Image (cartoon, rainbow, N blue to C red):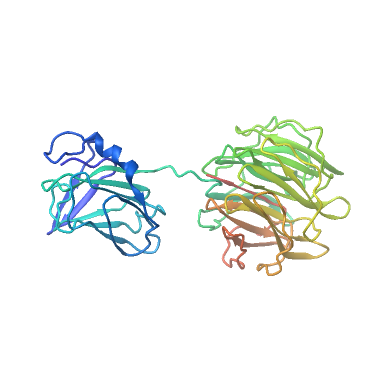
């Protein structure tokens, strides 16, 4: 049999299963050749609202986004059709692999098979374009394509690394695309605390700088599978700790500010190959340490809060070419030793920290880089010197911190912080860093 373009289709009925392969040829009503005109007809399709129900009746000439997030969907085709009638179905939520669609051909043939057969599609990301070709072959698919690459902002997994709890650690803990934190992975890089981390190259990460007993400028790259590399020997940039980092320009990163023995405002750009540049001389923001940073607006970043000799709430925006702006007056409660991450693909969140005592407040960052006032009802254990990163493409996670803990709190794609996760594995510690990858 022929006529399916893309992934295979099982047609079931009367105890029989016929597998229709991929040969790129669509049948005409006479069973011969390809009718290019079928493809041209797609321009006349009238697209309908998203279908979420478990059943629907399709009408010729329409296109239907089918959302099977909550249930499978049985689609009944028209009881009568004319040559050239066409219908398109598309996997709206990329969930047909879990809840597929079933097509009832309603008395007409489907690719030569009568309607005693069951026609099912069950591959994520499928678009199915069918055309009626006459009584013999009936409805035939002229397009059955699967979109395997999903454009997205952000990464699906994360990693916490390094830190201190009386002893200095180099262990890391991976974060799954569901926000589950794994047990310790043995240290590869030099053990240290108060480093920073960010993503680069769209799917990789980097830990940098920190305190080994003295300030250092070493970095460790993170692959797109979460493997931490050994120390990079030739890292440029002023040795320091208590700094922050974020991504910008979609595929690059920036380390900024920190403690060299005194507070500094120096920054170092990270290329999309993970190469750390020398110090930028003309950074305009207030010199400070123990601040936080995250990306926003899909390609920009923001540094915020910190300690200059007193706690601060000033922020500094980072353009999509890595230029750091002068101070923006603070909005949230002044504090230091907080963390930040992106969420919702284009927004950010600063959370927790130290005001003289540990707190659990958060401040959302809009997709224009505007920091909101304190959120009053944040759940989760108050703490400082923790870390945060994105996961699941559009969500975030705060983890670990002081007093020494391994508790984590998930951040939804609308910026809502969940209560403590009780069963976090990993060494309790503070003064660590985190970034996303993959």
Please state if 42 lies on the left or on the right of 112 as rendered.
right
The residue lying at 34 percent from left, 59 percent from top is 99
Q: How many marks?
A: 0
Tell which residue pokes out farthest to the right in this image: 309
Q: Position of residue 270 (x, y in %)?
A: 67, 35
Camera-nearest residue between 91 and 150? 91
Please state if 91 lies on the left or on the right of 106 as rendered.
right
Camera-nearest residue between 97 and 37? 37
Please state if 52 lies on the left or on the right of 432 as rendered.
left
User: Where, by quadrant of the figure, is residue 118 drawn?
Assistant: bottom left
The residue lying at 59 percent from left, 61 percent from top is 410
Camera-nearest residue between 203 and 89? 89
Q: Is residue 268 above or below residue 339?
A: above
User: In the rendered image, is residue 427 in sight?
Assistant: no
The residue lying at 40 percent from left, 57 percent from top is 49
User: Where, by quadrant of the figure, is residue 425 drawn?
Assistant: bottom right
Q: Position of residue 256 (x, y in %)?
A: 75, 42
Q: Indicate the quadrant containing the N terminus: top left, top right, bottom left or bottom right.
A: top left
User: In the rendered image, is residue 337 in sight?
Assistant: yes
Q: Is residue 198 above or below residue 411?
A: above
Q: Position of residue 156 (x, y in %)?
A: 52, 49
């Amino acid at each position: 049999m022929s006529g399916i373009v893309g992934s295979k289709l099982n047609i079931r009925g009367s105890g029989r299963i016929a597998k229709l392969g991929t040969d790129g040829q669509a049948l005409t009503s006479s069973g011969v050749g390809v009718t290019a005109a079928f493809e041209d007809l797609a321009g006349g399709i009238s697209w309908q609202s998203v279908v979420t129900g478990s059943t629907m009746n399709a009408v010729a000439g329409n296109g239907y986004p089918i959302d099977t997030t909550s249930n499978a969907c049985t689609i009944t085709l028209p009881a009568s059709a004319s040559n050239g009638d066409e219908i398109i179905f598309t996997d709206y939520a990329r969930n047909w692999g879990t809840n597929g669609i079933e097509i009832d051909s309603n008395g007409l043939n489907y690719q030569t098979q009568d309607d005693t057969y069951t026609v099912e599609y069950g591959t994520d990301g499928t678009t199915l374009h069918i055309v009626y070709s006459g009584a013999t072959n009936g409805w035939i698919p002229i397009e059955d394509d699967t979109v395997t690459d999903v454009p997205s902002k952000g990464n699906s997994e994360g990693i916490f690394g390094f830190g201190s709890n009386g002893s200095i650690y180099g262990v890391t803990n991976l974060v799954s695309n569901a926000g589950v934190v794994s047990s310790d992975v043995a240290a590869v890089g030099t053990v240290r605390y108060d480093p920073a981390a960010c993503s680069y190259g769209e799917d990789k990460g980097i830990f940098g700088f920190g305190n080994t007993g003295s300030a250092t400028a070493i970095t460790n790259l993170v692959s797109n599978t979460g493997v931490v590399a050994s120390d990079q020997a030739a890292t440029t940039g002023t040795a320091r700790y208590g700094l922050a980092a974020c991504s910008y320009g979609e595929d690059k990163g920036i380390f900024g500010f920190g403690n060299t023995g005194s507070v500094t405002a120096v920054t170092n750009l990270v290329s999309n190959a993970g190469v750390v540049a020398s110090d930028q001389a003309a950074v305009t923001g207030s010199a400070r340490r123990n601040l936080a940073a995250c990306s926003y607006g899909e390609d920009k970043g923001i540094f915020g809060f910190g300690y200059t000799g007193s706690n601060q709430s000033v922020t500094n925006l980072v353009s999509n070419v890595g230029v750091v702006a002068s101070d923006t007056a603070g909005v949230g409660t002044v504090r230091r030793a907080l963390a930040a991450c992106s969420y919702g693909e284009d927004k950010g969140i600063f959370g927790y920290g130290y005001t003289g005592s540990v707190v659990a407040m958060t401040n959302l960052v809009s997709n224009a880089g505007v920091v909101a006032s304190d959120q009053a009802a944040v759940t989760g254990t108050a703490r400082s010197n923790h870390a945060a990163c994105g996961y699941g493409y559009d969500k975030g996670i705060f983890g670990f911190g002081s007093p020494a803990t391994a508790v984590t709190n998930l951040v939804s794609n609308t910026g809502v912080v969940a209560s403590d996760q009780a069963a976090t594995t990993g060494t309790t510690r503070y003064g660590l860093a985190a970034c996303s990858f993959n």
